Image (cartoon, helix red, strand yellow):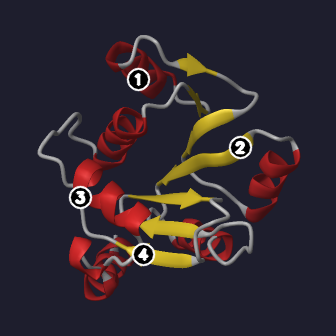
Amino acid sequence: MWFRFVSYLKFLANSTNQHGVHSPFVFKYVTQCLYSGKRLHRDKSINVLLKSIAYFNFDSISINHQPTIKELVQLNFPKIRFDENMVDLLFVNQLTVPAFQKILSEGKLHYHSLILVSSIYDNHRNLEQWNQLITLPEITVSIDMYHCGLISIRREQVKEHFTIRI
């Protein structure tokens, strides 16, 4: 309980809105997707997931071990494919460095794939995993939204980390 309270205060002190974003890719994502007036779900991580699927018009996603979220996505996006091979978006509760490297080595991510990690502030261990993950050279863009985090492996993007209030 105290960890989440203190971590949220630190997050607020370091976070910004769209005015602190200088990357065109991230600026458009924040303003046209995250800050769009639509609210698709009360849970902020799931809301970001649903908004991101709509914004990027993803065809293929993977949601590991979360059947209720998978059903919700299927209900909102009936044409979406749930794939375990190459995916546009991977949605996970947590992600360790070895798990990320395994996903990369298996070829599950393509050039424009995104990974959405929920629960990055649920506990100290998850936050440590997130912080280790975003330092990897393969990850060029990371967006900490407190309730979830988004990572990208877009090679044309300069490595940057953003802390955005949603």
Mark 4 vs 1, N-terminal side = 1
Q: Which amino acid does label 2 sit on?
A: His
Residue named by callout 3: 31
Q: Quadrant of residue 13?
A: bottom left
Q: Position of residue 67 (x, y in %)?
A: 51, 22
Numbered marks: total: 4
The answer for how far apart the CA atoms under marks 4 and 2 are is 22 Å
CB within 8 Å, label 1 to label 3: no
- In the picture, the quarter occupied by the C terminus is bottom left
Q: Position of residue 14 (x, y in %)?
A: 32, 87
Q: Where is residue 99 in the image (x, y as percent from the top left)?
A: 77, 53
Mark 2 vs 3, N-terminal side = 3
- In the picture, the quarter occupied by the N terminus is bottom left
Question: Which mark, by number, is residue 111?
Answer: none
Mark 1 vs 3, N-terminal side = 3
Residue 17 visible at all: no
Q: In this view, does 52 lie to the left or right of 91?
A: left
Residue named by callout 1: 73
Helix, strand or loop at mark 4: strand
Q: Which residue is drawn at 74% across and 67% down?
A: 138
Looking at the picture, does residue 58 appear above or below residue 2?
above
Question: Which mark, by number, is residue 162?
Answer: 4
Q: Residue at x 23, y 35 (%)?
A: 41
Helix, strand or loop at mark 3: helix
Q: Nearer the viewer, residue 129 or 106?
A: 106
Q: In this view, does 139 lie to the left or right of 74?
A: right
The answer for how far apart the CA atoms under marks 3 and 4 are is 14 Å
CB within 8 Å, label 2 to label 1: no
Q: What residue type is labelled 4?
A: Phe
Residue named by callout 2: 110
Q: What residue type is labelled 1?
A: Val
Q: Is residue 82 left or right of residue 123?
A: right
